[in-house]
Image (spheres, grey):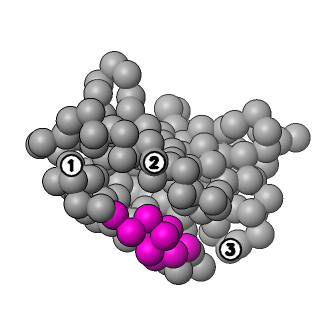
């Protein structure tokens, strides 16, 4: 049942995409959004997991940067706020979001809206956050989280 619900959300997303992009989403769950690879996957607990490749760490990233990155993850008190991680093979930073299928189904074009409209709005904020952390500038994590939540429909 859960897989069918996820497939219906993917089909809805594919309607909002160009044909070649829709084929990659159907076949591999992979999409490029504003130059960032996005992987969309069904998660066993009736959720959609979205991974956004934010690229390599900014110049100047040191052990303090990774410590601050982990500390920011503690501030993420909502499903709407991504967790930032490190992809082991590429060394790239990844934003990981997990949304319950029920939440995506309740909104008209929920998954499509999240991928096509919201992700491009959030990506500059994520990149700015990473740059500030590499420069050892204290980030106001509460303001960042509030900003992301305000962008949610």
Residue at point 68% right, 74% down?
A: 108
User: Seen from this angle, which residue lies furthest right?
Assistant: 1
The label nearer to you, 2 versus 3, is: 2
Locate residue 52, reporting x and y percent. Answer: 41, 46
Which tag, 2 or 3, sits closer to the chain's start? 2
Asked whether 108 falls inside the magenta stretch, the response is: no
User: Seen from this angle, which residue lies furthest top?
Assistant: 89
Dominant SS of magenta comes to: helix
On screen, residue 150 above or below 136: below
Q: Would residue 60 appear left or right of 30 to someone viewing this image?
A: left
User: Seen from this angle, which residue lies furthest left?
Assistant: 59
The label nearer to you, 1 versus 3, is: 1
Residues tagged 2 and 1 counted as in contact (Cβ below 8 A) = no
Q: Would residue 81 appear left or right of 64 to someone viewing this image?
A: right
Locate residue 30, reporting x and y percent. Answer: 45, 39
Q: Which mark is residue 71?
A: 2
Question: Rounded to the nearest whole Å, what is the CA distance between mark 2 and mark 3?
Answer: 34 Å
Residue at point 12% right, 42% down?
A: 60
Most foreground residue, 24 or 68: 68
Question: Rounded to the nearest whole Å, what is the CA distance between mark 2 and mark 1?
Answer: 14 Å
Residues tagged 1 and 3 counted as in contact (Cβ below 8 A) = no
Q: Residues within 10 Å of mark 3 (few under 14, many from 20)?
A: few
Read off the residue under disc 1.
Answer: 134
Q: Residues within 10 Å of mark 2 (few under 14, many from 20)?
A: few
Residue at point 52% right, 33% down?
A: 27
On screen, residue 41 above or below 107: above
Question: Could you tell me which quadrant the C terminus lies in?
Answer: bottom right
Read off the residue under disc 3.
Answer: 108
Residues in magenta?
A: 139-149
Asked whether 146 falls inside the magenta stretch, the response is: yes
Q: Which mark is residue 84?
A: none
């Amino acid at each position: 049942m859960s897989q069918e619900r996820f497939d219906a959300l993917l089909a809805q997303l594919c309607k909002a995409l160009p044909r070649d992009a829709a084929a990659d989403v159907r076949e591999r769950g992979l999409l490029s959004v504003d130059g960032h690879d996005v992987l969309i996957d069904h998660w066993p607990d009736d959720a959609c997991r979205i991974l956004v490749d934010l690229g390599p760490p900014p110049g100047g990233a040191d052990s303090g940067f990774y410590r601050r990155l982990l500390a920011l993850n503690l501030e993420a008190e909502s499903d709407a706020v991504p967790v930032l991680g490190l992809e082991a093979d590429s060394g790239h930073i990844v934003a990981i979001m997990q949304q319950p299928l029920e939440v995506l189904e309740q909104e008209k074009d929920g998954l499509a809206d999240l991928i096509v409209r919201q992700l491009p709005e959030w990506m500059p904020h994520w990149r700015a956050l990473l740059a500030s952390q590499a420069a050892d500038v204290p980030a106001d994590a509460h303001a960042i989280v509030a900003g992301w939540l305000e962008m949610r429909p």
